[in-house]
Image (spheres, coloured by chain):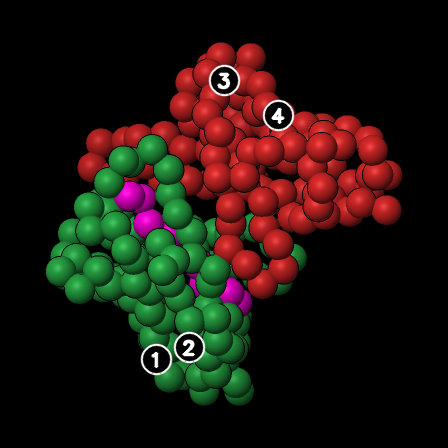
Chain colours: A red, B green
Amino acid sequence: DGGITQSPKYLFRKEGQNVTLSCEQNLNHDAMYWYRQDPGQGLRLIYYSQIVNDFQKGDIAEGYSVSREKKESFPLTVTSAQKNPTAFYLCASSTRTSGSPDTQYFGPGTRLTVL
Amino acid sequence: QKEVEQNSGPLSVPEGAIASLNCTYSDRGSQSFFWYRQYSGKSPELIMFIYSNGDKEDGRFTAQLNKASQYVSLLIRDSQPSDSATYLCAVMGSSASKIIFGSGTRLSIRP
């Protein structure tokens, strides 16, 4: 089965803790993305990576960090510097094919709650 | 002005009717446009994309793009209760490096 997996599905964090959200894809996609979604709102881009060992900040990168050591994996760390981390976190990947735009496909998401 | 704007709804449509969802965008150089469906508590699923002016049909869904008016819409024919969801419009801007999402329109199909 090809797809994007995220783990865990639910995550609870105490204030002051760092947590890492996993995102893995076996679609052989070059680019990967992390978004945050708050209730009733659209998706906001945290970080993205278009190639292994390279990544760029999105619109709301403060308090987050990422790595891209393998093509298949793009983990997101939510640090204690992120003041309001409770949200639904979505990972996506994309690749460009002939005749189609660079289309993003999403994993199932991780719901993070700060206690 | 938001980069991608959608009416938040809820939009209530009777079963079997046509649902019309609208989206405007601010970057005149935008290249590609996407519609995603998101059920409550789930991740977005791609419905379709469009990048040329005019209509593009896929089953009960039709995307319409008017670049001169900076407007993209999604029509859902023969609406079903299973179409009740939030529909996200997404736009790839002129830089082509990232996609901007609207905040979504909540659609409710009433029996």
Q: For the residues labelled 3 and 1, say whether their Cβ atoms are less than 8 Å apart.
A: no
Q: CA distance from mark 1 to mark 2?
A: 6 Å
Query: What residue is drawn where x is 46% and y is 79%?
Result: B11
Instruction: Give the number of marks.
Output: 4
Compared across the picture, whether B65 is left or right of B13 comes to left
Q: Residues within 10 Å of mark 4 (few under 14, many from 20)?
A: some
Q: CA distance from mark 2 to mark 3?
A: 40 Å
Span of residues in magenta: B85-93
- Mark 2, mark 3: which one is toward the viewer? 3
Q: Earlier in the sequence, mark 3 or mark 4?
A: 4
Q: Earlier in the sequence, mark 1 or mark 2?
A: 1
Which residue lies under the disc numbered 2?
B79
Q: For the residues labelled 1 and 4, say whether their Cβ atoms are less than 8 Å apart.
A: no
**Rendered location of residue A34, percent (x, y):** 54, 36
Name the chain under label 4.
Answer: A
Report helix, strand or loop for mark 4: strand
Report helix, strand or loop for mark 1: loop
Label 2 sits on what residue type?
Ser
Could you confirm whether marks 1 and 2 are on the same chain?
Answer: yes
Say the numbered circle drawn on residue A65: 4
Name the chain under label 2.
Answer: B
Q: Nearer the viewer, residue A52 or B69?
A: B69
Compared across the picture, whether B27 is left or right of B100 comes to left
Q: Main secondary structure of the magenta part?
A: strand
Name the chain under label 1.
Answer: B
Which residue lies under the disc numbered 1?
B18
Query: What residue is drawn where x is 48% and y is 35%?
Result: A58
